[in-house]
Image (spheres, grey):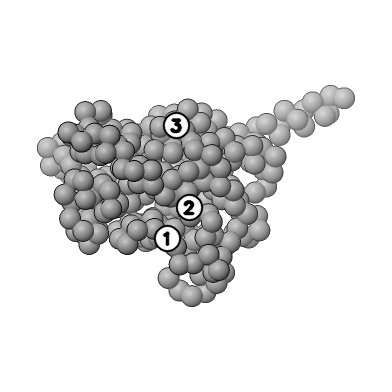
């Protein structure tokens, strides 16, 4: 990472970070900061909120207005911040379990409201911080500490869930595709409504080890070889896409943003007095 980005956007006294060697979270965090820089945002008008989990440690290293909240509640706190201070650019950093398990209801309704929050889900397909339990995105038949014989649940597709629930911007990348992650986050920040970027992140310590995915380099190479853009996927059969990761921008459909609509009601009532 260029030193100017580190000095400008990170709490250098908190570095180095403590993510496991080979974890993709550091790469994704760098992409977020790069997107903020490219978007030209005033960091004093950016608020970054997280819940609990490996991903949720990121705001502790980032030199913005930050809030580290309770498990699954990042979007609830972020909603309160955005309503109180709609002029702020509110960003939520969360994990697959944090966002779609205990925080699933908050996630659905934040999408539905189309409130102006940019949410980046670091998806490592497992609960990495709390012991390697399987999560709502753990692929079927893959293992975790709470699924030693293989997971039998069908995994959530976070992007499909967000799009169906009403998010106005949706995209997916991987830790390998760092430049794409930056582009998607920058586009998400430019969207006025609810934006979701899923960033697939390797967890060699738990997910990779338990499922014999090899080391961190092997996992990165797997993302390189098995991520497919929407344009390329259109030319492939369902069988050819089996086991692949679809990446790119999936939805960019601006809709009225929640706090703006709320302000209209306030203004209307004020005129009526």
Q: Residue drawn at (56%, 65%), measured in percent from left and top? A: 11
Which residue is under mark 2?
Answer: 57
C-alpha gap between disc 3 and disc 2: 18 Å
Q: Nearer the viewer, residue 137 or 147?
A: 147
Residue closest to the eye, 13 or 74: 13
Q: Which mark sits nearer the N-terminus, 3 or 1?
A: 1
Name the residue rendered at 27%, 34% in the picture. 146
Q: Position of residue 145 (x, y in %)?
A: 26, 39
Q: Is 151 above or below relative to 250?
A: above
Local secondary structure at mark 3 = loop
Packing grade of label 1 (10 A; few <14, some 14-19, many >=20) is few
N-term mark: 3 or 2: 2
- Numbered tag placed on residue 68 in the rendering: none
- Residue at 43% across, 50% down: 55
Which corner quadrant of the image does residue 152 belong to? top left
Question: CA gap, disc 3 to disc 1?
Answer: 24 Å
**Image depth: mark 3 or mark 1 in front:** 1
Task: Tell me, yes or no, whether the two marked residues, 1 and 2, touch with CB atoms within 8 Å.
Answer: yes
Q: Nearer the viewer, mark 1 or mark 2?
A: 1
Left or right relative to 83: residue 203: left
Most extreme residue toward the left is: 239
**Crowdedness near tag 2: few (<14), some (14–19) or many (≥20) residues, C-alpha within 10 Å:** some
Residue found farthest to the bottom: 3
Q: Mark 3 highlights which residue?
A: 102
Mark 1, residue position: 18
- Return the disc, 1 or 2, that comes first in the chain's sequence: 1
Q: Quarter of the image for the N terminus: give it.
A: bottom left
| x and y percentages locating residue 177 in the rendered image | 31, 58
Element type at mark 1: loop
Query: Can residue 118 be seen from the camera position used here?
Result: no
Would you say the residues marked 3 and 1 are in contact, meaning their CB atoms lie under 8 Å apart?
Answer: no
């Amino acid at each position: 990472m260029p030193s100017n980005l580190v000095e400008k956007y990170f709490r250098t006294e908190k570095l180095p970070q403590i993510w496991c060697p080979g974890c993709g979270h550091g790469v994704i965090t760098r992409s977020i900061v790069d997107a903020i820089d490219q978007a030209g945002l005033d960091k004093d008008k950016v608020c970054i909120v997280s819940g609990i989990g490996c991903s949720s440690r990121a705001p502790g290293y980032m030199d913005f207005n930050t809030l580290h909240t309770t498990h699954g509640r990042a979007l609830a706190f972020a909603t309160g911040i955005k309503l109180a201070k709609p002029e702020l650019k509110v960003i939520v950093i969360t994990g697959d379990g944090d966002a779609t398990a205990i925080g699933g209801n908050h996630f659905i309704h934040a999408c539905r409201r189309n409130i102006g929050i940019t949410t980046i889900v670091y998806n490592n397909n497992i609960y990495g911080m709390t012991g390697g339990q399987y999560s709502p995105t753990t692929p079927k038949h893959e293992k975790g500490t709470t699924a030693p014989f293989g997971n039998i649940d069908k995994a959530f597709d976070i992007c499909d869930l967000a799009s169906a629930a009403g998010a106005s911007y949706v995209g997916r990348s991987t830790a390998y595709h760092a430049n794409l992650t930056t582009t998607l986050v920058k586009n998400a920040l430019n969207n006025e409504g609810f934006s979701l970027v899923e960033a697939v992140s390797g967890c060699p310590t738990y997910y990779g080890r338990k499922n014999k995915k090899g080391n961190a380099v092997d996992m990165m190479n797997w993302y390189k070889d098995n991520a497919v853009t929407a344009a390329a996927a259109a030319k492939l059969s369902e069988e050819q896409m089996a086991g692949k990761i679809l990446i790119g921008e999936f939805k960019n459909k601006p809709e009225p943003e929640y706090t703006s609509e709320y302000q209209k009601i306030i203004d209307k009532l004020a005129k009526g007095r």
